[in-house]
Image: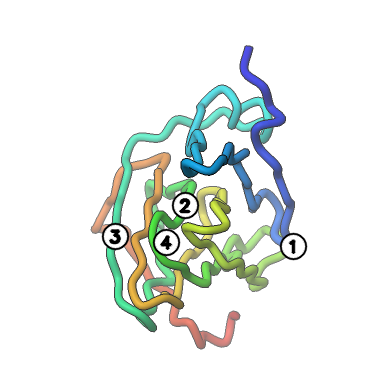
Amino acid sequence: MSNPQKLLLTPTEISDVLIIEPKVFGDDRGWFTESFNAQDFAIATGLDVSFVQDNHSFSRQWTLRGLHYQLEQTQGKLVRVVAGSVFDVVVDIRKDSSTYGKWVGVELSAQNHKQLWIPPGLAHGFLVLSETAEFLYKTTDYYHPQSEACLAWNDPIV
């Protein structure tokens, strides 16, 4: 069985949104980390999720992406940055949620190795802080352009 201590979890103000910090092993040669291990993820979070799609984006400084969500085929996302840094934001748009309309933000960077778990049904986006950034995300459902929607960063709900 895998070691759940490989992941440090920090809850956020939005139920089920988690900041995940994988253990990084470093020495004078550099570092190594398991960016994802299904067994460790399930043990640490208590979630049984299957990822079906990986996405990789490249953006320039001050690019704002999002706040995206899908009305049908909602996607859970595990997101991280592999180059540069972003300010990552999640907005709770679940009408039956006690945190409806609230948002959380966290800096994700190649240096801090932080990841963010975003459950299905939430809006997600990020602002690129560094000169450029590469952003990776695993999703629990496929991209479905017919049900794609976007919430403006300055929407009154937020």
Residue at image x 47%, y 48%? 77
Q: Which residue is mark 3?
A: 57
Nearer to me, 147 or 120: 120
Ranked by sequence position, the earlier of labels 2 and 3 is 3
Real-space CA distance between mark 2 and mark 3, rounded to the nearest whole angstrom: 11 Å
Label 4 sits on a secondary structure element that is strand
Res 79 label:
2
Residue at image x 63%, y 71%? 103
Q: Is residue 149 left or right of residue 35?
A: left
Real-space CA distance between mark 4 and mark 1, rounded to the nearest whole angstrom: 19 Å
Image quadrant in which the N terminus is located: top right
Res 69 label:
4
Residue 113 coordinates in the image, percent (x, y): 54, 52
Could you tell me the amino acid type at mark 3? Ser
Q: Which residue is mark 1?
A: 13
Ranked by sequence position, the earlier of labels 1 and 3 is 1
Residue 13 coordinates in the image, percent (x, y): 74, 62
Q: Are marks 2 and 1 in contact (CB under 8 Å)?
A: no
